[in-house]
Image (cartoon, helix red, strand yellow):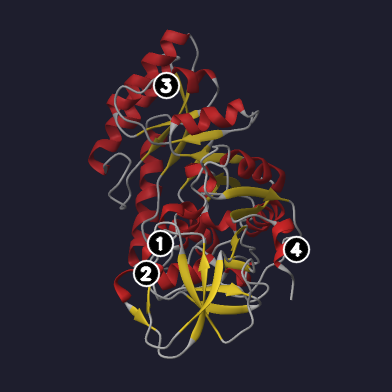
Amino acid sequence: MTSPAQHHDAHGRAEVVIDLAALRHNVATLKAAVGDALMMTVVKADGYGHGMVEAARAAREGGADWLGVAVLEEALALRAAGDTGPILTWLAVPGEDYRPAIEAGVDVTAYTVAELDEIATAARELGVRARVQLKVDTGLSRGGSAEPLWGGLVEAAATAEESGAVRVTGIWSHFACSDEPEHPANKLQEDAFREACAVAELAGLEPEVRHLANSAGALLRPSSRFDLVRCGIASYGLTPAPDVVTSAELGLVPAMTVRGRLALVKRIAAGSGVSYGHTYITPRDTSIGVVPMGYGDGVPRHASSTAEVQVAGRRRPVRGRVCMDQLVVDLGDDDVVTGEEVVLFGTGADGEPTAQHWAEWCGTISYEIVTRLGAQEPAQASARMRRVHVDGDAKGGDE
């Protein structure tokens, strides 16, 4: 058994380890899988908790043609970090200042004529042509132009293009049910998207790219790839359709490992209540380990008495309620000592749980698990979990 001192040398109390080699491998694997379509790697929300700038660099090295982010500030942060390639951003509210993004050559998205007008006005003030993509709602009922308003938006875009204020670089939409390949909404949305593209063409628009497919669409519905695909969760090594295919079957390697060290190991008697509310009572004498991570660090409280972690080469169940700063695991009668390594989840290559396992235990999706656990800014002195970027061997496991 590795000594606690050795573990202390290896890493600290609690940390999120991001393998950039795995990320590069995943992007390259996805790019090879989608044929001639261009690859957009989505790095919004701090790269799904993996670190936006670091994830973006690894994605570019893996072959990403585009980067995708939600808000303008994310795009500008990528530019400030030195990224000069195509970037698309898509979420804004009335009154946003588009000028910095337009100056930086970022593609911005318009859902409405009013939004397009704001973009065009900003471009005219700068004396440059804004790069604009138009989004149509084909059935997700979220962002994008509603179908009855689409014709008016493309006509307004054509007029703004003729005036020199904008260049319409893309037409796009987003799937609602692509993780369910047989869902009838997929064909309906693809048909609606083709029709929307035809309306744009009739208005005289000639976009550089048309794109509909997210990770699941890109991998499971080849007809939806068009000119470009947008891969988010799959880029980080997690399956976008866990009920259909595993990460390993897709050739993807989870890039995030969350690990720490046991703060305390102690023996407790049968009949002992564990953690708040005594929702778990020990049926026998056992050893418990205190893990210095809790919901304040992004560990879902739904993991209470449902999830497992790996300690000393074995899966160990979480017992009782997850607390703000810590959680308790059952070590049974094994000889485990304070300071032993704990892996909440990783690649699965060594038998540890994966983020997908945690998603299933907590009744959520892997997107939420990694984004929550990786959410703390490591540069802050108050950060409770250190985020570490490494360049490993991209070794995958089973899910």
Find residue 52 and name its label: none
Residue 392 location, quadrant: bottom right
Closer mark to the observer between disc 2 and disc 4: 4
Closer mark to the observer between disc 2 and disc 1: 2
Check the image and report above or below for 102 versus 215: above
Q: Which residue is mark 1?
A: 300
**Residue 227 in view here:** no
Residue appearing at x 49%, y 54% in the figure: 373
Q: Nearer the viewer, residue 206 or 182?
A: 182
Find residue 321 and name its label: 2
Q: Secondary structure at mark 1?
A: loop
Please tell me which of labels 3 and 2 falls first in the chain: 3
Residue closest to the far bottom: 284
Disc 1 crowd, CA 10 A, few/some/many (<14, 14-19, 20+): many
Instruction: Inspect the image, locate mark 3, and give the three-letter code of the amino acid beneath it.
Output: Tyr
Q: Nearer the viewer, residue 159 or 351?
A: 351
Closer mark to the observer between disc 3 and disc 1: 1
Q: Secondary structure at mark 4?
A: helix
Please tell me which of labels 1 and 4 falls first in the chain: 4
Assign the C terminus to one quadrant of the image: bottom right
Residue appearing at x 68%, y 45% in the figure: 58
Check the image and report above or below for 180 versus 30: below
Q: Secondary structure at mark 3?
A: loop
Q: Which residue is mark 3?
A: 98
Please tell me which of labels 2 and 4 falls first in the chain: 4
In the picture, measured across the screen, residue 166 lies left or right of residue 23, that is left
Q: Which residue is mark 4?
A: 6
Closer mark to the observer between disc 3 and disc 4: 4
Please tell me which of labels 2 and 1 falls first in the chain: 1
In the picture, measured across the screen, residue 398 lies left or right of residue 281, that is right
Q: Nearer the viewer, residue 111 or 190?
A: 111
